């Protein structure tokens, strides 16, 4: 559900397929206009760049659409769908749109505002009586704060949210219970930091006030009035045959379709053309769905709180729901642009709207990233504007310029130190001669980045595309402020301006606490409580706990607070302070468990080899916890066959933890056990697995 400019750093390698990529373009009747415009140049450019995504940017398939004054004038698709090549991509192929779903939630809330049912600045507790938290400040949270990411909620409650072909409503149904045990990370309204739980809470608000479940509500009041026949939620149980084919870089074969069961935050499926119809709400073409006043309200500068970088070219400037209400590069042309992107594990989407031009472009993909989708949508819009004569030429790409040699004030040395962001730390070292190096403690494609002090008082990268300075805000915290222009060949340029990290201070630990954490350092913890259909068993089945080597007293960004606890105290607006989580350990029957945001994991010390005899049985315990085993030297290379009920699954991993087989995906009767690997069995309590080994 994330949408972040950091997607530019995502490096995925999609498994190659024998099925050749196919390209098709849907012919769309051009609107009648006095110029007889056919958009042929835009159509050709969109087709070429969509194909570029599928050949050069790790994208399986692309679907796109351009709408102008209520008419869909360009529409097409590119790439591969099913492995057998039997299901061609069409304009009706549906994709998960991830966090672009948040705009449906925003529209629903604003409709209730239009009807006088709610007020944006009245506390949420007035509308959701069951909403409570440990932190008394929760009573100050308003619907506006949910929609502009300033509620102070810690982030995402992900348990059983991302499943394969499973519309289990657990994640939605338990949110209020999960929030009741949480505290806030900031005062409500203090600053905006991306937050999925805020939109699930807004979804619940819509249900409480309207008396309808969210899926029924959006169909009655949004999709049906706009003729969006290919927009569904998991609760509609969409036709699998209409879903875009999904693949994962390290797994061979096609995957089942993905369900995100936090619908208001990221669970809607749609098509590019349907989302183009949805965009008319914001261009004045659909005032029967939402008033022009409320549509315009969503596009206000909600991000302008005391804690936000000074204005700069950017892709993240929050409105209500929107990721940006001033999307670069459209300001270069004197135009206001709105955008909302979405990323699930497997689907990606971007909606870009030019309200004053009454135009919008949509790109949805299997594979890739929402950043790629946004850049393609930008390119389609700019090409159409040029073809219409609205703009005469494309603006050149921008740069901050290479560093201009200048003596650095000695005062800049104070900014050397360790800085943290969500689940990461970096060492920033500044020398007297004005050279700054940034080294990440985590594996990175750019392990050591070098910047030089420049005459403008900033540190610049040698190519001039990045500029860094430091800001100490009114809250007394010091931030690394990153500004970047990142160019992707053939797709254009994205601008980023954000507080990238916050300075953290080392701490000395009491001997007992330090020893407890040393015992855990480097240990893996294995997932126990996700449902047997969870994508987590494919993409993130275990986590390794590493104490910070460069920041004593911390585990990444989390400050150790006792022998069995650590907490993240970051306050970073935008994206880098999102989804903060503490760590809590407890021991039961001699086994250590780790609790991260209500998800339980078990210490690797409790994961023992399984003796794969000719016939074996594994039973899920009364706790419902998954059963993990390592694969011993004597069992490595054996082939196993597992009989199980429909409410269960198992997965096999190699020594590096890469998933080689997940029964929910299927495709094999027998599975070879990799030497040094592991195996997990998941299912309802009491479920039995009958294993035969050869």
Image (cartoon, helix red, strand yellow):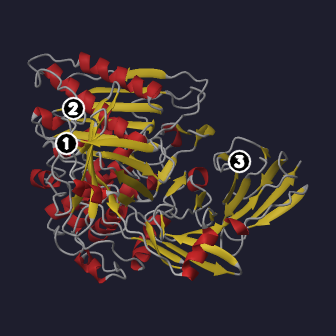
Q: Is residue 368 left or right of residue 650?
A: left
Q: Residues within 10 Å of mark 3 (few under 14, many from 20)?
A: some
Q: Distance between the residues labelled 1 and 2?
A: 10 Å
**Residue 109 position within the rendered picture, expressed as x and y whole percent measured from the top left:** 23, 61
Residue that carries the numbered disc 3 in the rendered image: 654
Q: Can residue 358 be seen in this view?
A: no
Q: Do the residues labelled 1 and 2 touch (CB within 8 Å)?
A: yes
**Vertical placement of 349 versus 29: above or below?**
below
Secondary structure at badge 3 equals: loop
Q: How far apart are marks 3 and 1 (CA)?
A: 44 Å
Residue that carries the numbered disc 2 in the rendered image: 398
Secondary structure at badge 2 equals: loop
**Residue 259 position within the rendered picture, expressed as x and y whole percent measured from the top left:** 49, 52
Q: Which mark is residue 373?
A: none
Q: Mark 3 or mark 2: which comes first in sequence?
A: 2
Q: In this view, does 521 lie to the left or right of 567?
A: right
Q: Are marks 3 and 1 in contact (CB under 8 Å)?
A: no
């Amino acid at each position: 559900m994330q949408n972040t400019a950091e997607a530019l750093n995502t490096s995925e390698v999609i498994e190659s397929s024998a099925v050749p990529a196919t390209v098709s373009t849907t012919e769309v009747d051009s609107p009648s206009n006095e110029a007889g415009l056919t958009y042929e140049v835009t159509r050709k450019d969109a087709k070429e760049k969509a194909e570029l995504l599928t050949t050069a940017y790790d994208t399986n398939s692309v679907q796109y659409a351009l709408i102008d004054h209520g008419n869909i004038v360009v529409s097409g698709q590119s790439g591969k769908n099913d492995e057998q090549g039997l299901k061609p991509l069409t304009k009706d192929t549906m994709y998960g749109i991830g966090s672009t779903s948040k705009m449906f939630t925003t529209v629903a809330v604003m409709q209730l505002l239009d009807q006088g049912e709610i007020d944006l600045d009245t506390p949420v507790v007035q509308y959701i009586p069951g909403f409570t938290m440990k932190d008394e400040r929760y009573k100050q949270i308003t619907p506006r704060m949910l929609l502009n990411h300033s509620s102070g909620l810690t982030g995402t409650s992900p348990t059983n949210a991302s499943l394969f072909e499973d519309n289990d409503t657990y994640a939605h149904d338990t949110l209020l219970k999960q929030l009741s045990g949480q505290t806030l990370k900031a005062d409500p309204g203090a600053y905006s930091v991306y937050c999925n739980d805020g939109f699930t809470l807004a979804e619940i608000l819509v249900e409480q006030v309207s008396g309808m479940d969210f899926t029924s509500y959006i169909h009655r009041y949004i999709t049906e009035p706009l003729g969006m026949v290919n927009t569904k939620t998991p609760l509609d149980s969409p036709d699998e045959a209409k879903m875009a084919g999904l693949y994962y870089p390290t797994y061979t074969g096609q995957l089942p379709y993905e369900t995100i069961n936090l619908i208001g935050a990221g669970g809607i499926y749609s098509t590019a053309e349907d989302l183009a119809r949805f965009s008319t709400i914001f261009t004045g073409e659909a005032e029967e769905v939402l008033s022009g006043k409320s549509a315009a309200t969503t596009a206000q500068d909600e991000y302008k709180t005391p804690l936000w970088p000074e204005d700069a070219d950017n892709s993240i400037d929050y409105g209500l729901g929107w990721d940006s209400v001033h999307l670069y590069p459209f300001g270069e042309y004197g135009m206001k642009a709105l955008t909302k992107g979405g990323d699930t594990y497997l689907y990606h989407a971007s909606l870009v709207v030019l309200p004053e031009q009454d135009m919008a472009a949509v790109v949805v993909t299997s594979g890739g990233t929402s950043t790629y989708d946004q850049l393609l949508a930008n390119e389609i819009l700019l090409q159409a504007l040029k073809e219409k004569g609205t703009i005469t030429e494309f603006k050149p790409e921008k740069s901050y310029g290479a560093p201009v040699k200048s003596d650095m004030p000695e005062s800049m040395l104070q900014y050397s130190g360790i800085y943290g962001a969500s689940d990461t730390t970096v060492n920033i070292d500044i020398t007297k001669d004005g050279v700054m190096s940034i080294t990440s403690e985590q594996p990175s494609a750019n392990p050591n980045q070098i910047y030089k002090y420049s005459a403008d008082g900033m540190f610049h990268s040698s190519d001039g595309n990045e500029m860094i300075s430091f800001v100490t805000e009114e809250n007394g915290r010091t931030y690394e402020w990153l500004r970047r222009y990142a160019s992707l060949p053939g797709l254009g340029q994205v601008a980023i301006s954000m507080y990238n990290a916050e300075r953290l201070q080392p701490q000395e630990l009491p001997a007992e606490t330090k020893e407890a954490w040393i015992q855990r350092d480097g240990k893996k913890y294995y997932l126990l409580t996700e449902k047997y259909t969870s994508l987590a068993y494919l993409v993130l089945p275990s986590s390794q706990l590493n104490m910070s080597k460069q920041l004593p007293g911390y585990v990444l960004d989390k400050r150790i607070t006792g022998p069995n606890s650590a907490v993240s105290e970051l306050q970073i607006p935008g994206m880098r302070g999102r989804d903060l989580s503490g760590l809590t350990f407890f021991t039961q029957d001699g086994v250590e468990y780790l609790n991260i945001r209500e998800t339980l994991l078990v210490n690797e010390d409790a994961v023992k080899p399984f003796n794969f005899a000719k016939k074996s049985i594994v039973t899920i315990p009364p706790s419902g916890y998954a059963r993990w085993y390592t694969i011993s030297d004597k069992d490595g290379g054996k082939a196993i066959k597992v009989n199980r009920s429909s409410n269960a699954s198992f997965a096999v991993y190699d020594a590096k933890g890469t998933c080689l087989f997940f029964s929910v995906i299927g495709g094999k009767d027998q599975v070879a056990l990799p030497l040094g690997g592991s195996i997990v069995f998941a299912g309802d309590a009491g479920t039995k697995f009958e294993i035969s080994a050869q």
